[in-house]
Amino acid sequence: MTQDDMSVKSISFPNPLEAGESETSDQDLQPTGRQTDKLPLLLQKGVNQFKEERDKDLFLIGALTVASGLLTKVSGEYNRVTAYPNLYSAVIGPPASGKSALVHASRLTKKIHDHKRKESEKAREEYKRLLSHARTTGETPKRPPYTVVNLSANCSSSKFITHLADNQEGDCPSVLFESEIDTINIVRRSEWGDFSDILRKAFQSEPISKSRTGNDEYLEVTCPKPAIAISGTSDQLRRFITNAEDGLFTRFIFHTLDGNSPWVDVSPCDSCPNLTEFFEVEQAAEYFDFWQFISGTPLKVDLKEEQWQTLNKKFGESLREVTEHESPGYAGIVKRHGLMLFKMCMVFTAFRKYEEKNASPLIYCRQEDFEIALSLIQRSLDHSLELVDLFPSRSERTLASGNRVYDRLPGVFSFKQAMAVAKPLGISERTVQRYLRNALRNRVLEKDEKGLYRKHHVSVVSDDGQNI
């Protein structure tokens, strides 16, 4: 596949379970449906408004991301550095692939956004009044921060830093939610619109500053904590992140969709709440209460010793596997997913603090929350390792990325045969599933109705000498 081919080809993501026959992966790859009743109650209430499992998953990812931006007083320690919960997530799929459930998560911050904006308008009017009196008193008042929770993607990099600085000063959450990645892409085409470097720093709350000589302006955001949720197609993603090696790609939780979104009954339902009103009014009010409670006092989140052991073991194994069997360049993807797991655990724990009205300054993550977070992050890691092959810097990589397995298999084989070859090589079941999905997508393999994989241009001859 050439780079030109990649610039126009859309990708379709098959069901993660179609490539393999494993029963153990089902729970990992479809976490919400089987574990909804284990979620914190506030999250449960939103997730349960949806019937389809894919919609439940989408809303959960969006709600966790949005909520992570509200937790400005929550922190933890990861790799001997203070970490904060703010997450970045991206849902990628073809047009009309059913991303609408994600949009409802953007409504959860409406009341908080309106509250902070009204505060800002009131402070601005007072500032204008004091400014008019300054002509006689000679005392110039300090400009108050103009705080808004919902940041616009349609802004310059300089304005984005100003928003982050004002929100930090005004103790206001920062959430950027954009359902069309191309909105960001259009702005990025201008010389003042590319804030990729800002996003990379902000993910890990590194200081950001800007300086202008025209008015001796110097602005610094010492600890940015924005949450970012976006969605779009694979082509839009490639325009947003032009090079998978620049680090922005590794900072996102990815969830991919195929184009097989089923038709749903669109007629009015007398017994069903209007989703726009439910999330924009009822849930927005509940998230306002959640934000007020969780912002009252600082909270430190920690994992239990066995959870740290699981995190280190899982991602240590994944790191070894991708660097040995795929590419050393993928190490950053794995390492940042370990941090994302800890960030997500902080978000779940904040929901539990609110639910229990727990006043403790230190709370350990519940095991059920850790397991759900782990399943979501493991799925994201799988999807990230598939998506990274879309980028031009990887275009020359062998399409059959699992060629060490592929070359040892017969012309027609089963998933069990593939695993029998992969296991002695130290290659996991999840990685074999990903190899097979990539090979199917790139037409290196095809799969028949019996679940057998056939290498292209391979004929199978029956006992009577006839081609099958």
Image: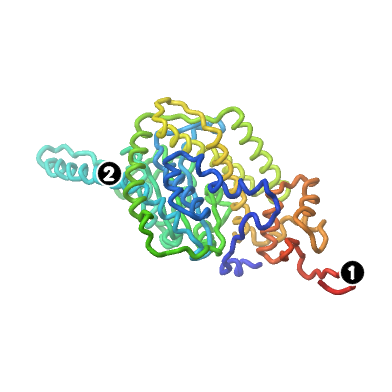
Q: Position of residue 49 (x, y in %)?
A: 43, 51
Work out whether 58 lies above or below 261. above
* Secondary structure type for disc 1: loop
Instruction: Give the left or right position of residue 43, taking residue 431 as reference.
Output: left
User: Which quadrant is home to the C terminus?
Assistant: bottom right
Q: Do the residues bearing badges 2 and 1 touch, measured as CB atoms within 8 Å? A: no
Mark 2 → mark 1, Cα distance in angstroms: 76 Å
First reached walking from the N terminus: tag 2 or tag 1: 2
Taking depth in this image into account, of 213 and 105 the one nearest to the observer is: 105
Question: Could you tell me residue 412's position as x and y percent?
Answer: 80, 63
Residue furthest to the front: 271
Horizontal side of residue 20 vs 207, given as left or right: right
User: Could you tell whether 243 is left or right of 423 in the image?
Assistant: left
**Closer to us: 336 or 275:** 275
Relative placement, left or right, of 427 versus 252 is: right
Q: Nearer the viewer, residue 142 or 239?
A: 239
Mark seen at residue 152: none
Q: Which residue is mark 1?
A: 463
Quadrant of image for the N terminus: bottom right
The number of numbered badges drawn on the structure is 2
At label 1, counting other C-alpha atoms closer than 10 Å, the crowd grade (few under 14, some 14-19, many 20 or more) is few
Colour pattern of the rendering: rainbow
Q: Residue at x 64, y 54 (%)?
A: 17
The residue that appears at 55% across and 41% down in the rendered structure is 372
- Could you say which quadrant of the image residue 13 lies in? bottom right
| Depicted 355 relative to depicted 180: above or below | above
Q: Name the foreground residue: 118 vs 396.
A: 118
* Residue designated by label 2: 115
Q: Crowdedness of circle 2 by 10 Å Cα count: few (<14), some, many (20+)?
A: some
- Indicate the amino acid at tag 2: His
Residue depicted at x 81% and y 63%? 411
| Residue at the spot 35% in from the left edge and 49% down from the top edge | 150
